[in-house]
Amino acid sequence: MTTSSADWQARQYSLFEEERTRPVRDLLNATNAAAAHTAVDLGCGPGNSTETLTAHAPHARVIGIDNSSDMIDAARKRLAQVEFALADISAWRADGPFDLILANAALQWVPDHETLFPSLVSKLSDGGQLAVQMPDNLDEPAHRLMREAAADGPWRDKLKGAERTTRFRADWYYAMLKPLCARVDVWRTTYHHPLAGGVDALIEWFKGTGLRPFLARLDAQETTAFLDRYRQGLKTAYPVFDDGSVLLPFPRLFIVATR
């Protein structure tokens, strides 16, 4: 993860590890990872994506980077054989070349994609691949309700600008990368995650991701009031099934660019 707001918590992020890891498996299945000798996991989080990368690229020297010390500590405990470093993606200066650069659910937090993506491609070996997965869910009720709750309360001034709004379509990435690459594959998948625990499970999910920039600016009392308001909106948007579960639709954008 690469936001500069309050530190990401590995425990919170890992509550839904299986659901969060499935997209990176799908992404790596579309790459030539098995042939890679050098690979890096940008925004490695607690190491779940790195562990998946090492399984797909068994012959590669793998490096993981993240700007959260909490995430890096968790990743090191998980994968003692992998090199991890505390660094921000936007300031990452390794020259490479790398056979595979993986960025799973990380680059949505990094600005200036028109500069960032070409820079990453320039670090690839000939035939190397940039493999990216980013949430594409800003139009989903869960995110819309975050923005509405932020704008509708005594905390509105505190929360101005906290939301993530930068977003580009698949054709924008294709047009930018195609002149730089031999092949560019772009696709979008919507996962439907059944979560036990009703709308509170949705809150726990987004506490590890989209809610973090909002909650980082609030004190304890404000956090409770903000989440109560958010919860009321979720109850309307996400029906609870008879067994107490909810279904979370989660669109994601995938890119595999081969140099």
Image: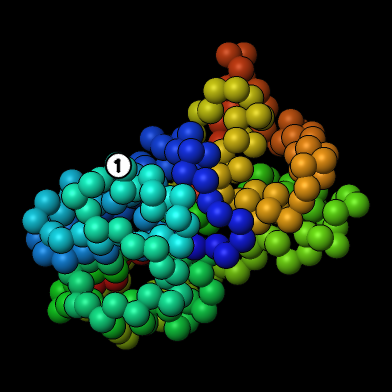
Question: Percent position (x, y) of residue 215?
Answer: 70, 49
Task: Please give the name of the residue rendered at 25% of the width and 45% of the height, measured from the top-left corner.
Answer: 79
Q: 114 above or below 157?
A: below
- Determine the residue located farthest toward the right in the rendered image: 154
Q: Is residue 178 visible?
A: no
The colour style of the image is rainbow
- Lateral position of residue 228 relative to residue 72, left or right: right
Please tell me which residue lies in front, 21 or 208: 208
Q: Position of residue 198 (x, y in %)?
A: 63, 24
Is 53 above or below relative to 179?
A: above
Left/right placement of residue 240 relative to residue 220 reads left
Front residue (pair 76, 125): 76
Q: Residue furthest top?
A: 242
Choose top left, top right, bottom left or bottom right for residue 227: top right
> In the image, what residue type sits under mark 1?
Arg
Q: Quadrant of the C terminus?
A: bottom left
Give the x, y percent position of residue 155.
85, 54
Instruction: Identify the residue shown where x is 19% and y is 50%.
Output: 81
What residue is pinned by disc 1?
78
Q: Nearer the viewer, residue 149 or 69?
A: 69
In the image, taking residue 172 as reference, residue 183 lies left or right, namely left
